[in-house]
Image (cartoon, coloured by chain):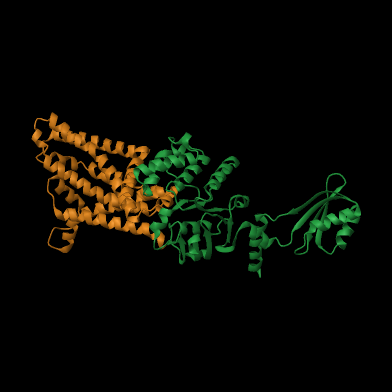
Amino acid sequence: MQTFVTLVRRELGAFFVSLTGYAVMAGVLFLFGFSMVLMLESLNATPAAVPIVELFYETAFFWLIVLLAAPVITMRSFALERASGTYETLMTTPVSDLEVVLAKFTGNLIFFLITWLPLLAYPLIIKRNSAAPEAVATGPLSTTFLGIFLLGCLYMSMGIFASSLTRNQILAAMNAFGMGLCLFFLSFVSKMIPLGDTWLSKVASHVSMFDHMLDFVRGVVDTRHITFYVSLTALFLYLTLKVVESRRWK
Amino acid sequence: MSDDWMIEVENLTKRYAGHTAIDGLSFNVRKGEIAGFLGPNGAGKSTTMRILSCFMAATSGSAKVAGHDIFTRADEVRSRIGYMPENNPLHTDMRVREYLKFRARLKGLSRARSRERVDVVTEQCSLQDVASKVIGTLSKGYRQRVGLADSLVHEPDLIILDEPTIGLDPHQIRSVRQLIKSLAGKHTILISTHILPEVEMICNRVVIIRNGRIMASDTPDNLRKLVGQESQVVAEIAAPEAELKLCWEQLPEVEYFDIAPSEGDFLRCSLTGREGVDLRQVVFDTVNRKGWKLRELTRNRHSLEDIFVRITRTDKEEEGF
C-alpha cells in the first residue's frame, strides 16, 4: 500500500511539474468554454426541453475532449519511463508489477478527472444567472460525472496499455487515439443497421458509447453500461500487466 | 561455507532471439568484497547485472543473492540490492531530496526512517549543496552521486553499479571512486567497467567476461601470477652496445632481450628471463663483474591491461583454429 500511494503521488506530481499537464488542462478548458458559448447561443435562439447537461453533451465537443485529451494524458506513463531508463530503476525496487500498473492507472485517472472538474462551474453559473434555475438538476449532473468517470477509466486503461507497448510517447498517443477512435466509431454501427431483434443490432446497441453517455446525461444509470466500462477497463489493465510481466519471459 | 557468499551464480544463460548474450556464466563473490566485472563492450556485463537485480529473467541457470534465489524470491532479493543501471537514469523533473525520499519510500522505508536515511546518504555522497535543486539542472558528476545515493538509501547488502564512472571528467571519476572505496566492508559491491586501471585500483576480485563467457575470475594478484610467470626486467646500463649484446646472448638465464638508447651514455635493456628466474640478481652481478655503471633496475609487474589483452587474445586465437 505504501509503495502504491508513493507511486500514485509521483505519477500525479509529474503532470504538475511538466508542461504537458498544464497544456492539456488549458486545451480542455478552452473547449469547455467554447462549447458553453455555443450552447448558450443556441439556447437563446430556440428554447429546448432537455436537461442542460444533455445540451452540452450534444455540442460534440464532449467527445473531442475525451478522444484527444486521454491519449495525451496517458502517453507518458510507461513510454517515458522506458525511454529515459527509469523503468529499470523502478522495476528493481521491491514493487509488484500489479502495483505499478494500478498506480499508473490511478494517477492518470485522477488527473483526467481533475481536468473535468472546471466543467462543474458552468452549471453553477447558469443556475445563478438564469431565469429558470430549475433547469440545472443535480441528478443528471451527478450521473453525467459518473459517466465521465467510467469513460475515463476505459480511456485511461486503454492509453496506458498503448503506452506500455512502446518507448516512443508520440507513438503511444497515436495508438491510444486510434484505439479510442475505433471504439467510439462502433457507436455509429447501431445507427447504420436497421433496428430489430437481430443479434447484430443488439450487440451494436450494447457497444454504442454514444448511447451510453446519452443515458448518463439524462440521469439514467444502467448497470449494463457500467458492466461494459468496468469489464473493458479490467481487460486493458490485464493486458498492460501482461506486457509489463513480459520482460521476464521475452 | 555458503554463508560467506553474497553472490552465487551458476550456469547463468540468457538467450535473445538469434543470439546468446551470456552463456553458462558461473562465479561467486564473497561478502564485503568489491568485485569488478570486466569486459569489452557488448560482452554481457549489463545483461548479467540486470538479471542479478531481478529486472529480467535468465533463460537457464540459477543465481542467489545473500542466499535467496533471484527467481523464486525476487522481492527478498530486490530489497537487498541497490542497483544503478548504465547511464544512471533519474527523474530529471524532481528535486534531489524529493527524489531520494521517493525512492526510499518505494523501497519500503517508513516515513521517519526514510527521512533519516536520506539525510545520511546526502551527506555520504556530498549532496548537501544541491539537495533542493532539480536533478535536470545538475552536472553529470552530481547526477552520478544522486544515483549512488539512491542505491545506498535502503542500506542494501549488495550494491550493483553498471559503469558508474562513464562519461565523467577525471576529478569526478576520482571522487566517485573514492566514494565507492569508502563503501567497502559495509556493503558488497559489484561494479562493471571497461576501464582497467579502475578495477586495479578499487577491486579485490576480478571477473573477466568476453562474448558472454567467463575468461577468468580471481583476485588481481592471482591473475597476475597466472599470466605473469616470466617477468620482465628493465636495466639502464652505461656500456658499449656490442659488448652488452654479446653478454646477454651468452647468459643462459636470459630468454630474449631488447636494447634501446637512453639519455647520455646509457642504454635501456629490456630482458625477459626463463621461467622462475629473477633476473635482477643476474643483471646486477654481471654489471658488477664487468665494472659497468648501472642507474636503474626494475621488474615490470604485469598490469591488468596485459592480463586482459592476453586472456582475450588467447580466446581469439583459439577461435581462429
Residue A181 image offset from top left, x and y in percent: 28, 51
Compare residues A237 and A140 and report the one nearer the observer.
A237
Task: Report the side of B210 relative to B143 (left or right).
Answer: right
Query: Residue B320 versus residue B292: which sits nearer the camera?
Result: B292
State the hue of chain A: orange
> Please, which residue is most extreme toward the bottom here?
B321
Residue B300, position in %: x, y?
Answer: 73, 54
Q: Name the residue located 51 percent from the left edge and 38 percent from the top edge.
A: B139
Q: Residue at x 54, y 44 (%)?
A: B179
Along the viewing direction, whichever of B214 and A194 lies nearer the viewer = B214
Is A65 on the left or on the right of B83, as rendered? Answer: left
Q: Position of residue B25 (x, y in %)?
A: 53, 64
Specify the colour of chain B.
green
Examine the rendered structure and indicate whether residue B63 appears above or below residue B167: below
Quarter of the image with the C terminus of chain B in it: bottom right
Among the 4 quarters of the image, the one containing residue A18: top left
Q: State the image coordinates of residue B26 (x, y, percent, origin top left).
A: 53, 65
> Seen in the image, is A160 located left or right of residue A195?
right
At 64% across and 60% down in the image, what residue appears? B222
| Residue located 86% across and 59% down the image | B248
Tell me if I can see residue A177 in this picture.
no
